[in-house]
Image: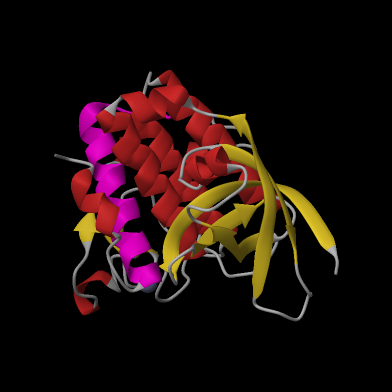
Amino acid sequence: MPLYRSDAFVLRTYTLGEADQIVVLFTREFGKIRAVARRSHSPRRHTASYYQPLLLLHAIFFGRPTQSLFRLNTVDLVQSFRQLHEDFSLLRSGLYLTELLDATTQEREPMPELFTLFQEALAELAQASQPAVVLRLFELRVLMAIGYTPQLLHCARCTRDLQPHERTFSPHLGGLICQSCAPAVRQTFTVSAAALEALRQAMSSEATNMPPLQVSAAGHQELERLLHAHLTVCLGRELKSYAFLHL
Ligand SMILES: [Zn+2]
């Protein structure tokens, strides 16, 4: 039976019978996979404690390519992101990023660039200098990676080029709309020129590095509203962990 090895993050786990659990992993090489692992009777019992989010693991698992479930063989800890497990606020942010990654990825669809982005986001988050900025940039990167880049250059309804003063955002259309279209579209809101400029700059930089997001506190709130509304429409639901970010 083929043996696979990959760096991986745990997205979530659920129990399977009395002794086993299913571990949902996001792997660098194979994308999201599900694997059966021992829960309590493991000969290497300490490995069960690695089956939790926000740890970079190296996993060895096996199974037939046609089966939906793999079996975990061994798991080693590569990086612990200790700060995320010691600070409740950072932990909540990390768990939100994990749920976002889970909600936006399909099983067995390799997305190595997204894996790298996630790893970088956790490392940035652990530095704790600007945790909210890390969240916004990762939200934006995920949207771009899954093909839902916010449309900021052309009207998302009629495709006409936008003028600088046309800053009405429609989450349902996934972008800005022009003045002519605005009266016909419901549930829109206006975004400031400064917030839009910050968003455009973040979108135009290299996909694999996290640029600084130069924006005021008010501008940041606007970006959070825009990205959250857009993501919620794309996913068709609100992520559970989002509500805990502002406790
Ligand atoms: Zn239009």
Q: Main secondary structure of the magenta part?
A: helix
Residue 233 x/y as whole percent: 33, 70
Task: Locate residue 23 relative to residue 198 in the image: left or right.
Answer: right
Residue 176 in the magenta stretch? The answer is no
- Region of the chain picked out in magenta, as a range: 212-235
At horizontal 32% and vertical 72% (from top left) the residue drawn is 172
Residue 180 image point, x, y percent: 29, 72
* Residue 185 visible here: yes
Q: Residue 44's image quarter?
A: top right
Q: Nearer the viewer, residue 207 or 77?
A: 77
In percent of the image, x 71 and y 79: which residue is there? 67
Total marks drawn? 0
Q: Position of residue 68 (x, y in %)?
A: 65, 77
Residue at 56% from the left image edge and 47% from the top image edge: 9
182, 103: nearer the viewer: 103
- Quadrant occupied by the N terminus: bottom right
Residue drawn at (72%, 60%), measured in percent from left and top? 30
- Does 232 lie within the magenta span? yes
Left or right for 95, reference 218 = right
Which residue occupies the foreground of this view, 32 or 151? 32
Dividing the image into four quarters, tell me where ligand 1 lies. bottom left
